[in-house]
Each structure stands twice: as C-alpha cells, then as structure tokens.
Amino acid sequence: MKTRVIINIFLFAVIHMVAKADNGHDLWLRKTIANPVKVVGTGKSQKMAIAMEELNSRWLGEADATVTLTISPDKRIKPDGYRLTANNVQATTESGILYGVYELLRLQQTKQHVGTLISNPSYQYRLLNHWDNLDGSVERGYAGRSIFWKGKGNTAVTDDDRSRWAGYARACASIGINGSVLNNVNASPEVLSAASLKRVKAIADVLRPYGIRTFLSVNFSSPKLLGGLKTSDPLDPSVARWWAEKIKEIYTLVPDFGGFVVKANSEGQPGPQDFGRTHAEGANMLADALKSRGGIVMWRAFVYSSTDKDRARQAYNEFMPLDGKFHDNVIIQVKNGPIDFQPREPFSPLFGAMKRTSVMNELQITQEYLGHSKQLVFLSTMWEECLKSDTYQEGRGSTVARCTNGSIFGNKYTAIAGVANTGLDSNWTGHDFAQANWYAFGRLAWNDTLSSAQIADEWLRLTFGSNDQNEITAGKDELWNTEFLKPVKEMMLSSRETAVNYSMPLGLHHIFAANHHYGPGPWYAPTGVRPDWTPPYYHQADTIGIGFNRTSSGSKAVSQYHQPLASQFEDLNACPEIYLLWFHHLPWSYKMRSGRTLWDELCFRYDRGVQQVREYQKIWDKSRDYIDQERFLRVQSKLKQQARDAQVWKDGCLLYFQQFSRRPIPYELERPV
Ligand code: GCW
C-alpha cells in the first residue's frame, strides 16, 4: 500500500515536471494551441509560405477568420514596413508581409488589441554581428560554441546545422532583424577562402527565406595573407582588383550578399594606416568594389592607441577630420560609449559629430562586461538610455537615435548592429534571461522609441506566459499577471542599474579583472602591460580621491560634446551623478547630493547592488508556481551565483579603494565577508 502511494506520488511528480518543462529552445516563439484560420495570400515564394505557416500554426485571433496578405502600393509603407488590421497584412515587399505577420501574432499572444496601424523600421539594416571564429569558438561568447562554424576539416553542412540556422533565422525575423554578419570582426582571412565561402552560401540559403541577408567581417590584409599579393595597400591597383574579383566570387554564391564589416588598425588588426592611407581611403576602396552589387561597408570606429592620454577621445579625434571623405555606401560603426561596452558610459561623442558621414550604433548583446551568461542583466534600459540621449547636434532633440536613423540628415543608408549572444546551448543564450537581450535588440532596431518596459512586458508574456487557453479562462491568468509578470518585470527593468551598483557605480569604468572581464580587478597593473589595459588608468584612485578628470583641466574630453552638454558634464553641480567619476577626479570627502561623502556614497551604492540581487532571489523564488520547473531552477541557480559574485565585486572594490580613502565602511552597512 505504502509503496503504491509512493509510486503514485512519484508518477504525479514526473507528469507534473514533464508538463511543466521547457528547455527554452523555442525562445519567445513557443508553441500555442492555435485557432483554425484561413490564410489568403498572393505569391508562392518561400517567404510567403513561412508567413502562412506561422499564421496557421499560431493564430489566436477569432476562430475560422480569413486573413489576407497583400502586396500594396501604399507609399506610406516603406520596404520592410507593413500595414496591419485584425485580419489583413499589407506591405510593399514580402519581407514586410512576414514582419507584419509576426507583429500580428505577437499582438494576439500578448493579448493586445489589434487596431489599424502602419509600422516602418527605424533603421534599414538591423544586424547581428557574430564574433564567431572559423574554429568554432566565439569571442566573448558565453552560450557554447558557434552555431555557424565548426572548425577546419569540419565543413560538411548537416541537416542539424540547417535546422539550427532556420530556427535562428526565424527568431531573428520575428523581431525584425534582417542581416547577420557571420564571423568575428577579428577576422581570419580564411573566411574568404573557397571552402569557407561554400559554407557561407549554405548559411545564406537558409537565412534568405526569412528576409535575412548575409554579411562577412573581413581582414584588411586578405589580399596579402590569402591572395598571396605583395601588399594590401588600398591604393594599389592589384589590391583593388583582388577585392573586386573576390566580391564577384561572393556574389555568384550569394546574390543578395550584404557587404563587409571591417575592424581596421584596431587592437593589432591590419588596416590602411599600415600603408600610410587613411580610414577613408581603405573603406572607400572596398565600398567602390561593392557598390554596383548594392553592398555596403560598415567601418568600425573602435580605435585607440597606447600613447594617447585619454582613450575616450581617440575615435573622435581620428574620425572627425575625415567627415565627408567616405563614399555613401560606407557607414561608420560606433560603439555606444567612447571606451568599450562598459556597464555605464555616456554616449560616444562620435554620435552627433559628423554631418556628411553615415554613422551607426554598435551595441553589445553578449554580456562581456555585464556578467556573461551567469548574471541576469536586462540590457534594454542601457540601450534606451543611449538611444534617447540628446547630442544637441542640430539643437535640442537630436538624440543618438535620430542622428543615426536618418531623420536628421536623411542618410541614404541607416543601420544598427548588436554583437550577438547566441551559441550551441540548447536555450541559445546560456542564461534564459539573456534571450530577452536578443529580443530587445531586435525590437529597438525596429522601433528605437520603444520603452524597455514594453519590451520586457512583451518578452515575459511570450516567453513565460501561459499558452494554454484553459488556464487563462480558469482565471490563472490574472494571478500570473500580479504574482509573476509585475515583480519579474520590475526585476528586469532595474537589473542593469543593479549591476552598475555592485560593479562600478558613479561613473567608474573598466575596473575588471584582466582578459575575462567577469569579476573585479581595480588593482591589476603588472609592469610592462599597456597602461590603457590596466584599471588604475581608469579609476585614478589615490589618497586624495578617485575618478578620471576629463574636464578642461584634465583630458578635455568634455569638449567633444556639443553645448549645453559639454558645460553640463564640466560643471560639478550639473554633471549627472551617474557620470560623476567618468568626468571628474574628486576628493573622498566630496559632498554628494545625498549629503554623504563620496566615499560613503560609493559604499552605499555597492551595498545596494548586492542587496538588490538578494531581493531578486526572493522575487524569483516566489515565481516558482507560475512557470515551468526547468527554467525556474536554472534561473534560481544562476541568481545564487550572481548574489555571491556581486558580493565579491563589492568587497573586492571597497577593500581595495579603502587603502586610498582610509575611511571606514559606514557602520550601518554589512561588513565584508
Ligand atoms: O570589447 C573588446 C573585446 C574584444 C573585441 C573588441 C572589439 C572583437 O574585449 O574581444 O574584439 O572589443 O570590439 O573589437
């Protein structure tokens, strides 16, 4: 009898767990119990077939409704854009139809009213940059090995590969991403070899029906390293000829190839300066070769040298004099901040600087400096902060978004890129909440005025919401909203500020442990290492104070911003405290707006960061009954680690800085452990 009870309990538990399991592989596109629908559409292309299949398998609108998909001549609808009503999708292109269908399904699934709306994307090119190496490793990747590359001698394309690429493409298309750069910006010349290009073609063939164009990162020395030429000088006719031939070869395989991304003369990569040429001369040579095919060049502005006094000023100094010298199919790709994807930076002054050159934003989805795939950090708020920052380029309202999306200068090409966080992990991104960052990037690339609150709300409903109509009608839905959605959304929305607090608050930056960029390392300064690769270069802590003086009495980086921003950053009373130590070196006794000393405030911020993660653990534990066990347990265990690592950040940094401040950690705060 007793055994039977135990067996029954066991069976119940197993059934319960199976019913409540979700390995996260379907991302925000989980299977739904769809209503029947009749889809009427023109065109028999693969793209249209995908649109129809999505509607047939996930329709939650009125049962037995007829939905029409129509190509329309409406001028208000831009390429990729769409016009939507509850049962009609209109677009000028098939890609537009596909995006409209995904939007319609998203609105249904998140239980929003579908009125009539026209939606056009903010940027023409909405791209993921994969830092995937040909050997299958991923630079700054935390979700397993590359989904595209498997290493030399392992080039055969399997059904498994194709189905993974299709799953990836579908996820991208569902949020409007329309291009993938398949390899690392630290590019191997080998990517242009015949064997690699064969694989590129196979990938492109799978991505194409989802409206995704393929791009490659190229090594500027490819003519020499791969082609065997004597030089890679961009002004040498044989070099230009080599590129033209290579480009011809690429387009034969991939007729809709998108173009190149180039990291040149940066961190040891070759570039035109090796031959005494400028970035413009290098970029234009490639752009000219791509032009007749409709390809573009995205030329990165991530440059700095060990000799300059302030790394934050260098990209601006190098690129501003070249304004107007780039051909129109070149876009300068600028990281959101002037240094390097730090937890918090002011926007790069290269946004809103050049007037005759297209500039695009490069955001980092992979969490190199924000906890890898171990920490729950929703990056949307960080990107929103950047996109909505006012550069004052053409007066008030010249936000970073508007300086790059063409609405100020009407640029011919507009783009935005995100460094991808995908890998072979079964949930694609390592941390289940890192999926939200992929999602948020796509949504912001489509509409750069969306709020992070809306994005988080959508993502949570799609990713964790019930897809069982019975549960919804039984009233579980409401409970789910108040007990799960609301607190978890608040956790997501505060999570980036939390990470800033426990790692580098008040404008501190780049105080990471060397190389892996995960934990703290403000002390790291071995002899012989480039000073701009050591944290003391950035925090400048001494017995008097802390912070990097970038005002007119320091490096003068403030002068790269337009007025009134430059004066605001310069003026201690006007400088936002979030950027305080980015722009100022201040005494430990400096009085903060809270009334505390700078030292005490620093302690409070670090402590708050740790407390916030402890709070997240409680919020998550309370969500146990509202979602599946598998993802619940995974996130729970990652939050544990995050809480421990936040503590390490706090204690490590405070104990280190305390040697300089020589002040006690305020007694109301927890002691270091
Ligand atoms: O953030 C730094 C990274 C490098 C990266 C480089 C870049 C691809 O630490 O890994 O290289 O930036 O953006 O080029």
Image: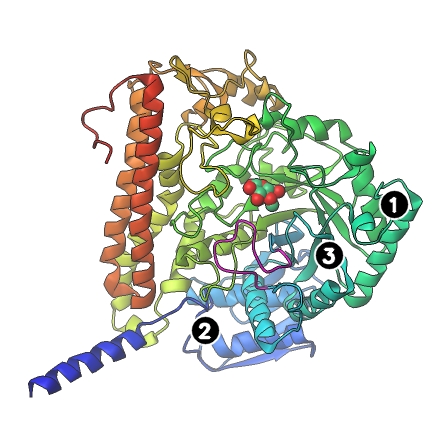
Instruction: Examine the image and state in which quarter residue 255 appears.
Output: bottom right
Residue 501 point in image, percent of width and height:
36, 35
Q: Taking 609 as reference, is 417 left or right?
A: right
Residue 164 point in image, percent of width and height:
56, 70
Q: Taking 507 as reference, is 69 left or right?
A: right
Residue 323 point in image, percent of width and height:
76, 31
Q: How many C-alpha atoms fall within 10 Å of the one at disc 2: few (<14), some, or many (≥20)? A: many
Which numbered circle lies on residue 312? none
Residue 68 appears in the rendering: no
Label the magenta part by its dominant secondary structure: loop
The residue wearing badge 3 is 190
Say if mark 1 contacts mark 2, CB within 8 Å: no
* Front position among marks 1 and 2: 1
The residue wearing badge 1 is 230
Name which residue type carries label 1.
Lys
Name which residue type carries label 3.
Glu
Give the residue at the far left of this rendering: 1
Mark-to-mark CA distance, 3 and 1:
17 Å
Name which residue type carries label 2.
Gly
Instruction: Examine the image and state in which quarter residue 601 appears.
Output: top left
Give the residue drawn at x 59%, y 30%: 391
The residue wearing badge 2 is 61
